Image (cartoon, helix red, strand yellow):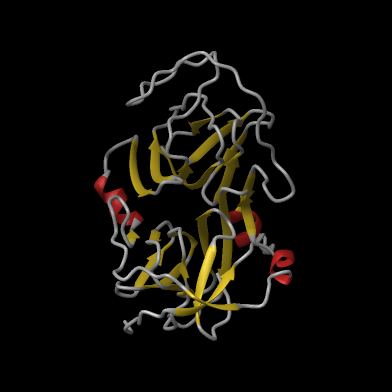
Amino acid sequence: MPKLPVICTAIGIIFLFGAADAQQAAKPILAWAPKPARLTPYAAPNRPLWKLAEILKKHAGQQGWRETVVSTPDFTGAYVAMASGEKTKTIFYADDRAFWVVQAGQIRFTIEGQEPFIASKGFLVQVPYRVPFSLETVGDVPSLRFEIRPPEAPIYPIAETPDPARGVQYIHASFNGHGTYDAVNKPALDFEKDIVQGGAPPPRTFLKDDRLGVEIFRGPQGAPPTALGHYRANYPGLWFVLEGQETFLIEGEKLITAQQGDVVFAPVGRWHNVTASGAGHSTRLAINARPGNLHWYPEGAAGGE
């Protein structure tokens, strides 16, 4: 892996999601960019690479389990397996969306205001804030999902019985308002059927609000990354490999090759770069807190993911 220098002068670009936003982006501005003098360390459970194969080996023989692989102040990420017939309680969250990638089996999603639907491998699903939802494994095999949720305790509809939560007491209280779907934020995308098999171009953005974003990057095989790429000023980088194989260059780490289902994480302030690799097309999901967060690029470089 090439040595990554500490660069004090850098081009600051606020990278905005979507073609329309990109067209409105201002000309790059040269500035003195603050960068940690020492590499931001990984704090458990965060690590450069979580390999799905190793997670499955760890939980071999178990029907239901949870493995938290990402923890940040803004969200947590976990792999969750549920046995056939198992169902979650109905819950919702105060101000944040929940997001899932179905990895195996079949899950019935019941979301208030939507017709229940069954999602299988390759489905992307999201629920807006303050919208009650539940999940149930259907069929005769366990289901497996990767999920992103806010870190706080969930809220339960008044007819549900809350599960105990450390440091929390549940009381009766009322609230107003809830989130909605829109032209960008739709309940689900069957990536395997519509994109991989059907040949449709994937949307650039599956989920976006002022707190969370999920972008889809799909492309053919490329050369392993060697350039610095960029670093984020205040938020970490998180990726889920949805299809094929991706190669990641993260400052301070050996070159990472990640397969479908693997999860990759870069702490705040570390240079990183990503390319598609392997045969055929590959796809990664870039999961970011605060879409539009400040990305710093080396002086003279063009912007990117």
Q: Quadrant of the C terminus?
A: bottom right
Residue 132: percent from left, percent from top: 58, 28
* Front position in the image: 275 or 157: 157
Q: How many marks?
A: 0
Judge left or right: residue 179 versus residue 298: right
Judge left or right: residue 123 versus residue 233: right
Residue 84: percent from left, percent from top: 42, 31
**In this view, 121 is above or below 202:** above
**In this view, 26 is above or below 120:** below
Q: Residue at x 58, y 81 (%)?
A: 302
* Front position in the image: 167 or 140: 167
Q: Residue at x 35, y 82 (%)?
A: 5
Q: Quadrant of the N terminus?
A: bottom left
Q: Quadrant of residue 245?
A: bottom left
Judge left or right: residue 205 versus residue 151: right
Residue 131: percent from left, percent from top: 61, 30
Q: Residue at x 46, y 46 (%)?
A: 74
**In this view, 46 is above or below 116:** below
Task: Residue lying at the far front in this picture: please name it.
Answer: 32
Judge left or right: residue 240 versus residue 36: right
Q: Quadrant of residue 86?
A: top left
Residue 215: percent from left, percent from top: 58, 59
Q: Residue at x 51, y 45 (%)?
A: 100
